[in-house]
């Protein structure tokens, strides 16, 4: 059994994990979706959200932007984080289950911009490197 968490805004991936108010928790078994539930994180700060995601035994977090602190905490707890993603949740889940999820297809514009202009990253050197 595997659990995927996706911060949501309407039917899309929320632009920021740190400011999202709810997370969609998808439970998979044998490459089939068996359960979906929304977890409210309305009054949680970034630390509390990361702890809650860890407590839910999530294996993969697919999200938009995420703070370096929350990213580091989630990764230290063994959660695979796929950041800087945007798009329709149903489409992303379907492609992820089928093993056809192409990160570049759903990458947020900022993520694409940064890759084409690597000199812009110099000011972020003191932070942890992005996982992509």
Image: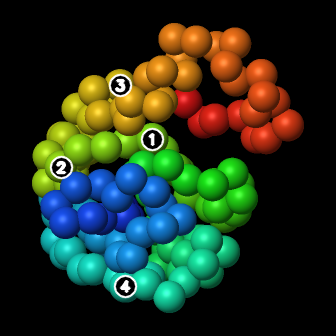
The answer to whether mark 4 and mark 1 are in CB contact below 8 A is: no
| Residue positioned 35% across, 76% down in the render | 22
**Spatial CA span between label 1 and label 2:** 14 Å
In the rendered image, is residue 55 in sight?
A: no
Find disc 1 in the rendering and name its residue.
Answer: 84
Which numbered disc, 3 or 4, marks the residue that appears first in the sequence?
4
Q: Nearer the viewer, residue 131 or 109?
A: 109
Q: Name the quadrant containing residue 36.
A: bottom left
Q: Nearer the viewer, residue 58 or 50?
A: 50
Find disc 2 in the rendering and name its residue.
Answer: 88
Which numbered disc, 4 or 1, marks the residue that appears first in the sequence?
4
Left or right side of 92 for 55: right
| Residue positioned 35% across, 72% down in the render | 23
Q: Which mark is residue 40?
A: 4
**Spatial CA span between label 1 and label 3:** 10 Å
Q: Which mark is residue 50?
A: none
Q: Please tell me whether mark 2 sits on a helix, a strand or a loop.
A: loop
**Spatial CA span between label 4 and label 2:** 19 Å
64 vs 29: above or below:
above
Q: Nearer the viewer, residue 102 or 18?
A: 18
The answer to whether mark 4 and mark 2 are in CB contact below 8 A is: no
The answer to whether mark 2 and mark 3 are in CB contact below 8 A is: no
Find disc 3 in the rendering and name its residue.
Answer: 104
């Amino acid at each position: 059994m595997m659990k995927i968490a996706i911060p949501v805004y309407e039917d899309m991936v929320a632009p920021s994990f740190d400011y999202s108010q709810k997370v969609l928790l998808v439970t998979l078994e044998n490459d089939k979706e068996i359960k979906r539930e929304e977890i409210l994180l309305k009054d949680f700060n970034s630390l509390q959200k990361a702890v809650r995601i860890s407590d839910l035994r999530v294996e993969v977090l697919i999200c938009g932007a995420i703070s370096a602190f929350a990213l580091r905490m989630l990764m230290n707890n063994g959660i695979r984080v796929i950041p800087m993603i945007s798009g329709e949740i149903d489409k992303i889940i379907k492609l992820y289950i089928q093993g056809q999820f192409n990160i570049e297809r759903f990458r947020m514009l900022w993520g694409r911009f940064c890759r084409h202009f690597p000199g812009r990253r110099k000011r972020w050197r003191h932070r942890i490197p992005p996982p992509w």
